[in-house]
Amino acid sequence: MAKTETNRGACLCGAVSYQVLGPLRPVVACHCNQCRRASGHHVAATSANRGDLRITGEDAITWFTSSPGIRRGFCRFCGSNLFWDNQARPSVSIMSGTLDRPTNLTLIGHIHTASKGDYYEIADGLPSHPHDDHSLTS
Ligand SMILES: [Zn+2]
Ligand SMILES: [Zn+2]
């Protein structure tokens, strides 16, 4: 049976776009050092099964290896952060701000808050974890 699209998204300039053909995980905000530097603030990401993600314009993506086995994909033209890919996992994280609206998703928590920027507070009352929280991200 053909899978139906649940969401689609794109980078700022449109050179990279993608379709998601399956369920997306709720959104988790990551405040770690790497996400801060890569995004300029913090990241908010959902994730999809690798096989449910269809990328158009993949040759416009630059993959930066940020840790062994982990790569971050951004548009080489406009710089949009699009993907976080732990290649050992069956899922790929998608930066939720790159999704078209309506996303039908909800932010459910924060991770790596011990590393967050010191110029803002997290005051939304959602679960926050100083480091990783696999109950939120797996
Ligand atoms: Zn772009
Ligand atoms: Zn992070």
Image: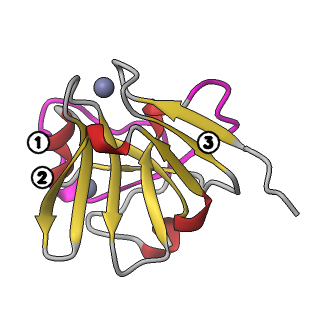
- Give the label on residue 33, or none: 2
The three-letter code of the residue at mark 1 reads Arg
| Cα–Cα span, label 3 and label 1 | 24 Å
| Residue beneath the point at 55% across and 50% down | 54
Q: Are marks 3 and 2 in contact (CB under 8 Å)?
A: no
Magenta-span inclusion, residue 11? no
Residue topped by disc 3? 106
| Cα–Cα span, label 1 and label 2 | 6 Å
Q: Mark 3 or mark 1: which comes first in sequence?
A: 1
In the rendered image, residue 3, in percent from the top left (x then y), is placed at: 79, 56
Q: Are marks 1 and 2 in contact (CB under 8 Å)?
A: yes
Q: Is mark 2 within 8 Å of ligand 2?
A: yes
Q: Secondary structure at mark 3?
A: loop
Q: Is residue 136 visible?
A: yes
Q: Is mark 1 within 8 Å of ligand 2?
A: no
Q: Is residue 42 visible?
A: no
Q: Is residue 56 left or right of residue 34?
A: right
Closer to the camera in the image, 86 or 30:
86
The three-letter code of the residue at mark 2 reads Asn
Residue topped by disc 1? 37
* Span of residues in magenta: 100-126
Q: Secondary structure at mark 2?
A: helix
